[in-house]
Amino acid sequence: MSNARTAILQRLNSVERPVVDVSARESLSVVSWDKAECIHRFTERMQAVRAEVHRSDRGNWLDKVAEICKTKGLNNLLLSPKTEWGQVITQNAAQFPRLKHYERSIEDWKEELFYQVDAGLTSTLGGIAETGTLILWSSPDEPRTLSLVPPIHIAILDTDKLYTTFAKAVKTQGWLEQGLPTNALLISGPSRSADIAQVLAYGVHGPRELVVVLV
Amino acid sequence: MAKPTEFRIDVEKALGKTEVRAHFRKAMDTLMTNRRNQFPDDAALQALRTQAQAIRANALSKLPELLEQLETNLTKNGVQVHWAETTDEANQIVLGIMQKHHAQSIIKGKSMVSEEMGLNHFLEERGIEALESDLGEFIIQLDGETPSHIIMPAIHKSKEQISKLFHEKFPDIPYTDNVDELTASARRILRDKFYAAPVGLSGVNFAVAETGTLCLVENEGNGRMSTTIPPVHIAVTGIEKVVEKLSDIPPLLSILPRSATGQPITTYFNMISGPRKADEKDGPTEVHLVLLDNGRSRIYSDPELLATLRCIRCGACINHCPVYVRIGGHSYGTVYPGPIGTILEPQKEGLKVHGELIQASSLCGACGEVCPVRIPIPNIINRLRHDSVRKDTENTPTQDAGTRRKPLEAAIWQAWSWSASHPSLYNFGGKTATQLRGLVPNNLGAWTKVRTAPKLAEQTLHQQLKALGVDHE
Ligand code: SF4
């Protein structure tokens, strides 16, 4: 083991550590919003940071997504054909712009991914009402770059998986028990910056537009 | 009179720049208002601060164990962990990784620890390009500057200055002062760089020991790009950033962006627990974490100074500081400016180098009041003032303790403290002083350079209270 490691740990261990009162550590903020309130808050927060939110149901979500693609004038749409949503979209490909499936390693098609994809569509693991947030876990089917590199990100959120707070989501979904993926992400709007004279600008490095479809 | 120090010269210069000062005032006012709006319920804010403080204090109370646990879990997840005692060691580690991959460039997400390391300079001296990708960092790097704020590095620059700078550095792009167009240009330029970069670097906001997870907050997506696109990701962090449990994260994430920029949450919260797995299609194939000490374990050894390490680098103390808003970030001459810099830098670098900063405080207390983890910054400033003049230097870990002790000053205070504990002598001295009040000169050196000389009252406080019938004994 390296000398630095030994030396640092030795120094830290030689300190007589004060006993601290950490009883406040566990206090969980309790909010109890019903589903309608959760949807309302989520939508309000998202719209406040210029994300689009569309309502739909099990019957018409597909048309909704198709309509969004049309309105945005997309030439193509990148997605995984294996998710619940991706499967149905793939079966109804005629309604959509040209579908691209994320099936190869990034190295094999980096240039196309970077410069020739109009939008990426992902599923989500859930949402957070308090902050207007999407939860995404990277997976072999839906890699990290799917929600990062294309200029438009379309995300589908099942409203049954809308939680009040982040703490609640972590607990209810059992993140600790499941074990975390290589990349767990919270997304709360399109990419933005206020680094130039505190003026808000969108689409700095990540997607310029975030479109959420609630089902 | 003593020669003015570099700090004083810089402060003097900064105070003369009326336009820049107005700019800072406006920016800080906005940030303060934004923060206030995020905490409409004071009781809830105070409860959350207490919780955040407890989380950080708990982590520090178990620091060596948690660092080992973090290392074990990260290693299990496939992340390579490195330890560095000094910034030089940390730089060497980064260089070593780059050389192993024959990498000639590195793209960076925002990292104050890499600023602390002077990494860009170090790499450039060795012919390696280090490119900042955070928009603010990108801008100041174009102009050869360092950050003037820990979360808004280019806050000192006006839109006009940035427009001119872009045009000067990228003559092919037509001049514009439209913020959206400037941002789009930066996006285009940096996209190509992300595309080609062999190595990406980032800081760490929180490291979770229990799961071996590195957490990053950001708005732009450059942090995600830097940690996702290049085949190698190197994260650098101070050893104090670890927390014990995954459940510690939500409260910290709840208070950090609200305290910092007044956002309910940042656009991205990125939790990295390992490199790309065999069946995954993207993400770096190698992830490294460099744990940097650089004086932190020394700070750790003192029960009072230890609170400094609770810091989650939100910048709220900076935004609320009446000194910072007037002199700006660069005058400090340090990596971390404002109140957090004022207590951290003299502890890290020693009182000889940055001891003067602790004098530049009115102890107004604003920083301590807004700090999300309740670091008693004013008390620590006082403590460091004491350290700088104390005689029992063996009782503090602070480097260069006692170096500001002047025998004459010490003797005067000693005499005062002796007289103050002898009432009759104290009263006699007080009366004599008021009688001789006419003798106070108008010129009192540095003090009267910017102020009028103080005049003693005709009667001592004791005398006045007695006249009012108050029994003061
Ligand atoms: S000292 Fe407190 S207020 Fe200042 S940056 Fe650190 S956490 Fe934020």
Image (cartoon, helix red, strand yellow):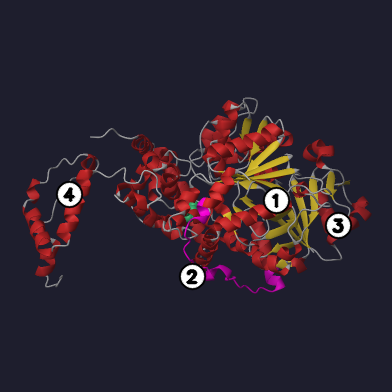
Residue A56, position as x, y percentages in the image: 80, 63
The subunit letter for the residue under badge 4 reads B
Q: Which residue is mark 4?
A: B454
The Cα atoms of the two marked residues, 3 and 4, are separated by 77 Å
The verdict on residue B371 being magenta is: no
Residue at image position (20%, 39%) is B445
* Chain for disc number 2: B
The location of residue B343, given as percent across then percent down, is 42, 49
Q: Earlier in the sequence, mark 1 or mark 2?
A: 2
Distance between the Cα atoms at labels 2 and 4? 42 Å
Labels 3 and 4 share a subunit: no
What SS does tag 3 mark?
A: loop
Crowd class of label 4 (few under 14; some 14 to 19; many from 20; radius 10 Å): few
Q: CA distance from mark 4 to mark 1?
A: 64 Å
Q: Which residues are magenta?
A: A11-39
Q: Are marks 1 and 2 in contact (CB under 8 Å)?
A: no
| Nearer the camera: disc 4 or disc 1 | 1
Q: Is residue A21 magenta?
A: yes
Q: How many angstroms separate mark 3 from mark 1 (CA)?
A: 31 Å
Q: Decide: marks 4, 1 in contact (CB < 8 A)?
A: no
Residue receiving disc 2: B43
- Mark 3–mark 4 CB contact (< 8 Å): no
- In this orientation, which residue lies closer to the viewer: B262 or B458? B458
Q: Is residue A23 visible?
A: yes
Q: Nearer the viewer, mark 3 or mark 1?
A: 1
Q: Are marks 3 and 1 in one subunit? A: no
Marks 1, 2: nearer the viewer:
1
Q: Is residue B180 left or right of residue A136?
A: left
Q: Find disc 1 in the rendering and name its residue.
A: B75
